[in-house]
Amino acid sequence: MKRRLFASFYGRFDRRLRAGTNRLRADLLGDLTGEVLEIGCGPGSNFGFYPPAARVTATDENAHMLPHARRAATAAAAPITVAYADATDLPFANASFDAAVATLVLCSVPDLAAALGQLRRVLKPGGSLRLFEHVRSERRGIARLQALANPAWGVVADGCRLDRDTGAAVRAAGFRIESETPARAWASTFALPAIVVRARR
Ligand SMILES: C[S@@+](CC[C@H](N)C(=O)[O-])C[C@H]1O[C@@H](n2cnc3c(N)ncnc32)[C@H](O)[C@@H]1O
């Protein structure tokens, strides 16, 4: 029930929620080509930013999100197939994708190292990883507030954690970082500290 409500909220307000991140998403995804995997696609927040040269397999493990995503896929320039999949147990062959995308997802997966391990497994050698994720602040006071808010936030935001050091986890998973840029994850009217990462398997 809670997950259905979350999907319905995200589906209805997707456009407004991502308004402050449209340019960032366009920069991150606009040059992708070949077979692209997106995990935690939600209602299809990224679909309008993929170029026609990308063949996208978009996945989510909340079944209530999938109808929203399928609707968004019909309006996209790129061919997009929407499927159920848990990021920590991806049903795809080793080395089957040219690029993998996660935006505002790795905060929610229960096992971050497992999800990154799966992304690395399904990427071809040299394949591109593109991430936009909110993270723990580098400012100690804000990080402390994030830790305090975590339990209540997780309940209303479908298990999302405010205190992950996702950049360090990407390095620990064995990816070669090309760039890691600080950003803000605007959710309607408030922003969380975030990073944009481009890395290679
Ligand atoms: C905050 S939404 C982000 C949606 C979209 N990617 C965006 O950029 O706005 C997080 C999404 O990740 C999905 N998710 C959470 N845990 C997941 C997992 N283990 N595997 C796949 N998707 C997951 C949720 O169902 C939800 O759709």
Image (cartoon, helix red, strand yellow):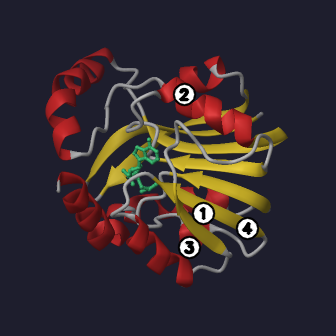
Query: Circle 2 sits on which residue?
Result: 114
Cα gap from disc 2 to disc 3, whole angstroms: 28 Å
Query: Circle 1 sits on which residue?
Result: 26
Check contact, mark 1 vs mark 3: CB within 8 A: no
**Which residue is at a point 32% across and 62% down the rendered structure image?**
17
Three-letter amino acid code of the residue under disc 1: Ala
Q: Quadrant of the C terminus?
A: top right
Res 159 → quadrant = top left
Q: Position of residue 30 (x, y in %)?
A: 68, 64
**Which residue is at a point 35% across and 20% down the rendered structure image?**
139
Q: Nearer the viewer, mark 4 or mark 3?
A: 4
Q: Position of residue 4 (x, y in %)?
A: 24, 61
In the image, taking residue 29 as reference, residue 115 lies left or right, namely: left
Check contact, mark 2 vs mark 3: CB within 8 A: no
**Which residue is at a point 23% across and 64% down the rendered structure image?**
9
Q: Nearer the viewer, mark 2 or mark 1?
A: 2
First in sequence: mark 1 vs mark 4: 1
In the image, taking residue 69 as reference, residue 4 lies left or right, namely: left
First in sequence: mark 4 vs mark 3: 3
Cα gap from disc 4 to disc 2, whole angstroms: 25 Å
Q: Is residue 187 visible?
A: yes
Provide the secondary structure element on which disc 2 rests.
helix
Query: Circle 4 sits on which residue?
Result: 55
**Would you call the spot at circle 2 few (<14 residues within 10 Å), some (14-19), or many (20 or more)?**
some
